[in-house]
Amino acid sequence: QVQLVESGGGLVQPGGSLRLSCAASGRISSPNVMNWYRQGPGKERELVAQITSGSITNYADSVKGRFTISRDNAKNAVYLQMNSLKPEDTAVYYCNLKVFRSPGGDYWGQGTQVTVSS
């Protein structure tokens, strides 16, 4: 069974930076994609960024140029570097792993709070 644990959230002022980490335990097969989602107050959960096991990345328009997703396959970890943070980035951020090789899997972390406020 795969477990995901996020870390790195917190309170930051507008314009500041944070780096989120997500460590996956258990055996992870390829191909897969690791995602960061977020859910702000009163909002639906949205995809922020994703990176495939082949390191292809994709970003939501709202974070392009400010956020960078990366992964370390040797450590089964994914990271989200968030720069130039805005109050509208305030949300609970969730790590998600989707495994495509049979039998497949869809795993979620518990979430980490990011608050951007002065």
Image (spheres, rainbow, N blue to C red):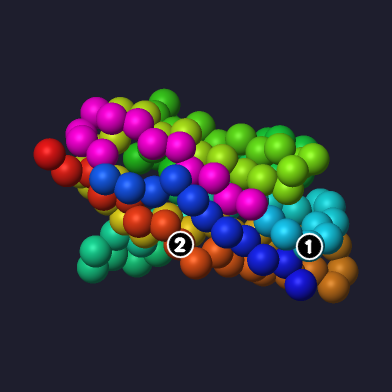
> Is residue 110 highlighted in magenta?
no
Q: Earlier in the sequence, mark 2 or mark 1?
A: 1
- Residue 59 seen from this side: no
The quarter of the picture where the C terminus appears is top left
Spatial distance from mark 2 to mark 1, Cα to Cα?
19 Å
* Left or right of 12, for residue 82: right
The answer to whether 87 appears left or right of 29 in the picture is left
Q: Is residue 15 magenta?
A: yes
**What mark, if any, has residue 26 been given in the picture?**
1
Q: Position of residue 8 (x, y in %)?
A: 44, 46
Q: Residue at x 79, y 69 (%)?
A: 104
- Residue 77 image-quadrant placement: top right
Q: Which residues are magenta?
A: 12-23
Number of numbered discs overlaid on the protein picture:
2
Q: Which image quarter is the N terminus in?
A: bottom right
> Which numbered tag is attached to residue 111?
2
**Position in image of residue 78 (x %, y %):** 62, 44
